[in-house]
Image (tube, rainbow, N blue to C red):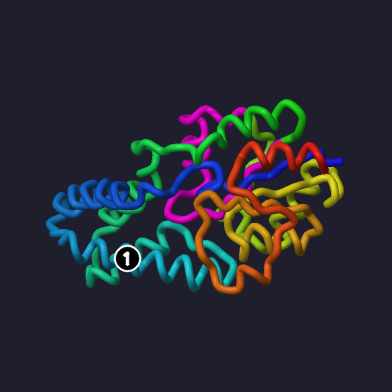
Amino acid sequence: MIKVVSFDLWNTILSDRDTKNHKEYRYNGLSFIFSKYGYFLDRDKFLKSIDDTWNIFFNHHWLEKGFTPTTRSSMRTFLSYLSIEDYPEEFFDEVVKFMETSFLNREVSFVDNMDRLIKNLSNDYKLALISDTGFTPGKYLRRVLKKVDIFKYFSLFIFSDEIGVAKPDKKVFELLLKYFDCQPGEVVHIGDIPKTDIKGAIDSGIKSILFKKEIYNFKDMEKLKADFETDDPFEIEKIIKNL
């Protein structure tokens, strides 16, 4: 019998499809900070540098090494790509703070009907959120979740920057099991990335649902077969209630 349902965040609950507009917002914000300290931020160089930084973070550190660097670490890499060195610490602090908090001032949207699914499931199950973090650390993602009014439905939040490891590390799911004092067979995890969400659940003996609404295409994803696959939030509810 399922007692706990855990969710991934990006591309599962909240959509990450507004990347182009968000990059523009970040460019404008960082341009203002740069100009305060006498630097010029070329738009094309910004786009290339932020993409290169993300690729190292995403493909090397996260997917290959299994951890998520801090925003401070990522921003030092970003500035190195721009060939900016020996910068004032006050400048660097402003850049980091802006990147960490940028989602607080941007509109974020739910993946279709995921907010309704969360509300429905909260009536019968304990809910947890398990999120690997990027440029935005967990303390600010909590504020994003409060802003979109779903924070109150979750009993537990596990963010990779706060625990020092990322999915699929078994420690992530062991924390969940310990917190709720439950067995693996009493938990189902929902996420969009086979290599992190599904592998982590499989390795921990937890049921898994691959949510394919906004899924990334990953190598070897066919080798990580989830217990269930769907792109319909209401199908997820049916699956869980039948477990």
Q: Nearer the viewer, residue 145 or 121?
A: 121
Residue at the (18%, 59%) spot, across then down: 43
Find residue 128 and report its horizontal and vertical position in percent.
68, 41
Look at the picture and state if 43 lies above or below 112. Answer: below
Q: Secondary structure at mark 1?
A: helix
Give the amino acid type for the residue marked by disc 1 in the picture. Answer: Phe
Q: Position of residue 52 (x, y in %)?
A: 34, 69
Pinpoint residue 136: horizontal percent, then vertical percent.
44, 49
Counting from the top left corner in percent of width and height, residue 98 is at: 33, 47
Name the residue: 57% across, 72% down. Answer: 65
Nearer-the-camera pick, 51 or 142:
51
Left or right: where 198 falls relative to 181: left
Counting other residues with Cα less than 10 Å from the Cα at mark 1, is it few (<14), some (14-19), or many (20 or more)? Answer: many
Q: Which residue is mark 1?
A: 78
Which residues make up the magenta segment? 127-152
Q: Is residue 165 visible?
A: no
Asked whether residue 96 is drawn in magenta, I would say no
